[in-house]
Image: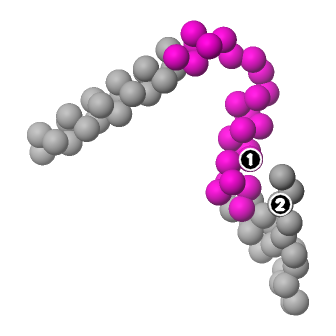
Amino acid sequence: MSIEIKLRKGEPMDRAIRRLKKTLDREGVIRDVRAKRYFTKPSDKKREARKVAAFTQMLRTRYEKM
């Protein structure tokens, strides 16, 4: 998996870097790198997933009442 950003004619370097960052964010590369930075036990992954699901459910119920 390689991501290429070609400089357009007359394009400033900072704009090209911004396009690269957006592409990396869309592809999920940075998220994957951060997730693989250290080992997480499967039980901890499940616990975190349950925690996120409970939070989103709480938000849904809160805003359904409005």
Q: Is residue 34 magenta?
A: yes
Q: Is residue 59 above or below residue 25?
A: above
| Residue annotated with mark 2 | 3
Q: Position of residue 16 (x, y in %)?
A: 81, 72
Dot 1 surroundings within 10 Å: few (below 14), some, or many (20 or more)?
some
Q: Is residue 47 magenta?
A: no
Secondary structure at numbered mark 2: loop
Secondary structure at numbered mark 1: helix
Q: Position of residue 59 (x, y in %)?
A: 28, 36
Q: Position of residue 66 (x, y in %)?
A: 12, 45
User: Distance between the Cα atoms at labels 1 and 2?
Assistant: 10 Å
Q: Which residues are magenta?
A: 23-46
Marker disc for residue 29 = 1
The disc labelled 1 sits on which kind of residue? Answer: Val
- As drawn, the residue found furthest toward the front would be 1
Q: Position of residue 27 (x, y in %)?
A: 69, 54
Is mark 1 in CB contact (under 8 Å) with mark 2?
yes
Dot 2 surroundings within 10 Å: few (below 14), some, or many (20 or more)?
few
- Chief SS of the magenta region: helix
The disc labelled 2 sits on which kind of residue? Answer: Ile
